[in-house]
């Protein structure tokens, strides 16, 4: 069997968004699962919009996500010669032709077709020009290049992992533009030629590309080039079922990274979309890969859920080693240390929640209103008694101490527990009290009790 080669082929015209992540991830999973190669190719032929800054940003986002690519990143612009050769070969065979129709003319043709209830296809007018006529005209008039695909007879078969062969009648296909009037190539030809040149065996992409695939299969076959196996996955939609946008909760990867998200949370949530057979406990990437099966990817569109992603974030956060978690917490609280991290890890949903527990490190951090209200509600003399008892105790045992306070003050239940919890931890919820007491030690507990005793 030939080695599987997939690719992620973004145009470097913007930041990586969730739709890109899905396509990149599926191609990566497919290659890695089958021991193949995953290539990164920047489709940078639209020179006016491509920017080096986005090339770097896209690379950085892929690295952060752990989607490593094989070899150097490729640039479509480096294959310009091959794109031109392909066009020349097609023109030579009469399969590509110059079209001189103006935008106004095309607009009128479209209107006419629509008014007759026909699809707005190109009329085929310039296809009738002879090569010589077209060449002569091209000396004085602007033109685009089209592929001569539309025909009354014949079919194009797009091989698709999820759908089998998708059959297009050529009568339903248009003559697509492959070179614009400024001489630049549209997406269709370079993308297909590069897949052939780069030896891509499998192209996984959104099903909005299905018709493009029909054009590209035709083009590759016309040039006797290898046609990859396609996998057109259902599109990723926003939470409201509409196209994914900022409004519906789509963020750039950069934004998510900067908000402290654990990259694997995005990978976990994204891999599971439209792929329901992955067990919930497939926790690490190796387990995800083992469970990944391209044939299970949904052909229907799938809805993004930020909530699911953040739920994964919390689950993963709870599974991180304290040493790995510590730097994430230090972004928000530089004084965090390893013991402190182990103590509170289970109580965090997000890294920034660490701020709720600052008081465990520094007794001078003021209480919030709720915590202060609990301290104020403690019975008369409660903290004085608690401190005296604590100071007479030999060992720092929470249960023994709490029972002694209960006995001495007559307080029980919440009236006993909450004033102690808040006095020691500064928060209404958090790690269990034995762990807090162990962490603070004799001195730490005393300092905090003295602190709440001050008016
Ligand atoms: N540059 C194309 C895009 O970003 C690539 C599509 C494909 O995967 O073939 O849509």
Image (tube, grey):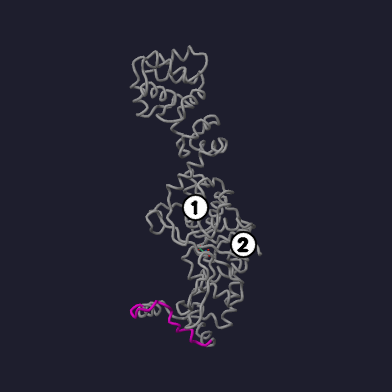
> Tag count in the figure?
2
Q: Earlier in the sequence, mark 1 or mark 2?
A: 2
The one nearer the camera, 200 or 355, is 200
Residue at 51 percent of width and 85 percent of height: 134
Which image quadrant is residue 230 in?
A: bottom right
Q: Any magenta on residue 374?
A: no
Which image quadrant is residue 3 in?
A: bottom right
Segment tinted magenta in the rendering: 114-130
In x, y percent, where is residue 358?
Answer: 46, 30
Q: Is residue 181 visible?
A: no
In x, y percent, where is residue 392?
Answer: 48, 11
Q: Is residue 351 visible?
A: yes
Picture quarter with the C terminus: top left
How packed mark 2 is, by other alpha carbons closer than 10 Å (few <14, some 14-19, many 20 or more), is many
Q: Which residue is mark 2?
A: 5
- Where is 216 relative to 381, above or below? below
- Where is 240 relative to 207, above or below? above
- Where is 362 relative to 230, above or below? above
Q: Any magenta on residue 129?
A: yes
Q: Is 289 on the left or on the right of 449, as rendered?
A: right
Residue at 41 percent of width and 51 percent of height: 249
In x, y percent, where is residue 397?
Answer: 50, 19
In x, y percent, where is residue 199?
Answer: 63, 66
Say what secondary structure mark 1 lies in. Answer: helix
Residue at 53 percent of width and 51 percent of height: 61
Picture quarter with the N terminus: bottom right
Q: Which residue is mark 1?
A: 272
Please name the predominant secondary structure of the magenta segment in the image.
loop
Say what secondary structure mark 2 lies in. Answer: strand
Label 1 and label 2: CA atoms lie apart by 23 Å
Q: Are marks 1 and 2 in contact (CB under 8 Å)?
A: no
């Amino acid at each position: 069997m030939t080695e599987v080669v997939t690719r992620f082929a973004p145009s470097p015209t913007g930041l990586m968004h969730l739709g890109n992540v899905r396509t990149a991830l599926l191609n990566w999973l497919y290659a890695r699962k089958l021991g193949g190669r995953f290539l990164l190719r920047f489709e940078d032929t639209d020179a006016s919009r491509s920017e080096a800054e986005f090339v770097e940003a896209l690379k950085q986002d892929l690295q952060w996500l752990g989607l490593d690519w094989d070899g150097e990143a490729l640039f479509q612009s480096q294959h310009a010669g091959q794109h031109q050769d392909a066009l020349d070969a097609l023109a030579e065979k009469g399969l590509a032709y110059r079209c001189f129709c103006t935008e106004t003319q095309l607009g009128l043709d479209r209107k006419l077709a629509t008014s007759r209830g026909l699809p707005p296809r190109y009329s085929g007018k310039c296809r009738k020009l002879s090569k010589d006529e077209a060449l002569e005209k091209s000396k004085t008039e602007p033109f685009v290049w089209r592929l001569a695909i539309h025909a009354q007879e014949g079919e194009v078969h797009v091989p698709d992992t999820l759908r089998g062969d998708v059959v297009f009648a050529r009568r339903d296909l248009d003559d697509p533009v492959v070179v614009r009037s400024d001489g630049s190539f549209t997406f269709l030809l370079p993308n297909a030629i590069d897949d052939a040149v780069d030896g891509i065996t499998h192209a996984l992409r959104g099903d909005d590309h299905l018709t493009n695939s029909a054009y590209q299969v035709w083009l590759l076959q016309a040039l006797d080039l290898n046609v990859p196996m396609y996998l057109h996955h259902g599109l990723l939609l926003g939470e409201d079922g509409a196209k994914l946008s900022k409004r519906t909760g789509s963020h750039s990867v950069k934004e998510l990274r900067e908000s402290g998200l654990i990259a694997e949370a995005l990978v976990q949530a994204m891999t599971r979309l439209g792929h329901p057979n992955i067990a919930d406990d497939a926790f690490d990437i190796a387990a995800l890969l083992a469970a990944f099966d391209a044939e299970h990817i949904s052909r229907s569109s799938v809805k993004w859920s930020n909530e699911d992603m953040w739920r994964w974030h919390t689950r993963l956060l709870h599974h991180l080693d304290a040493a790995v978690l510590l730097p994430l917490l230090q972004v928000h609280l530089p004084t965090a240390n390893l013991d402190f991290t182990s103590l509170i890890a289970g109580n965090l949903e997000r890294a920034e929640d660490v701020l709720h527990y600052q008081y465990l490190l520094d007794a001078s951090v003021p209480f919030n209103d709720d915590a202060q209200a609990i301290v104020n509600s403690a019975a008369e003399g409660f903290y004085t008694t608690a401190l005296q008892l604590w100071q007479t105790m030999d060992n720092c045992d929470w249960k023994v101490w709490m029972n002694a306070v209960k006995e001495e003050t007559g307080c029980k239940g919440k009236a006993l527990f909450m004033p102690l919890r808040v006095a020691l931890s500064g928060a209404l919820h958090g790690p269990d009290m034995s762990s807090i007491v162990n962490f603070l030690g004799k001195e730490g507990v005393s300092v905090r009790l003295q602190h709440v005793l001050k008016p």
